[in-house]
Image: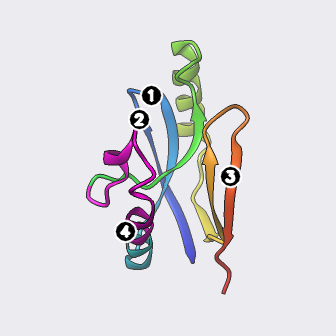
């Protein structure tokens, strides 16, 4: 699946910094199907992954447990250093958000 990551953003409440893909029809359809498949398994953050509320993103920094300055330093670095990324999504995975991140399951998307 083609990948074009062209923007940066943050969730201020959790101090999460991310980059975002430019979405296309196939990616939105994939997300809707994934949501329908997994909706019965999510009991805590169900609403945030609803197709009409979802913010597609690739997390690059979780600074919520760090001092507030870490969030601003990381944001500033990203604002100055980020460059567009063009390529292919070749797999998708389910991870447990821990430190380090624990990979639970991965699916190859190559055709």
Q: Which residue is mark 4?
A: 32
Specify the quadrant of the image occupied by residue 107: bottom right
Closer to the observer: label 2 or label 4?
A: 4
CA gap between label 3 and label 4 equals 21 Å
Secondary structure type for disc 2: strand
The residue under label 1 is 14
**What residue is rendered at 68% in x and 59% in y?**
105
Q: Residues within 10 Å of mark 1 (few under 14, many from 20)?
A: few
Percent across and percent down for residue 45 are 39, 41
Helix, strand or loop under label 4: helix
Q: Residue at x 45, y 60 (%)?
A: 38
**For the residues bearing labels 2 and 1, Cβ distance under 8 angstroms:** yes
Mark 2 lies on residue: 11
The residue positioned 62% from the left and 43% from the top of the image is 96
Residue at image position (66%, 87%) is 111
Picture coordinates of residue 39 (x, y %)? 39, 57
Dot 4 crowding, Cα within 10 Å, few <14, some 14–19, many 20+: some
Indicate whether 81 appears above or below 104.
above
Q: Are marks 2 and 3 in contact (CB under 8 Å)?
A: no
Instruction: Quickly name the residue at label 3.
Output: 104
- Residue range in magenta is 31-52
C-alpha gap between disc 2 and disc 1: 6 Å
């Amino acid at each position: 699946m083609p990948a074009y990551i062209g923007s940066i953003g943050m969730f201020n409440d959790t101090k999460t910094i991310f980059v975002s893909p430019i979405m296309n029809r196939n990616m939105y359809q994939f997300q809707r199907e994934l949501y329908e498949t997994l909706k019965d398994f999510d009991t805590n953050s169900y609403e945030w992954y609803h197709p009409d509320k979802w913010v597609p993103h690739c997390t690059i920094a979780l600074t919520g447990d760090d001092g507030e300055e870490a969030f601003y330093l990381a944001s500033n670095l990203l604002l100055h250093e980020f460059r567009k990324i063009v390529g292919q999504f070749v797999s998708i995975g389910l991870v447990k958000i821990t430190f380090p991140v624990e990979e639970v399951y991965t699916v190859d998307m190559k055709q």
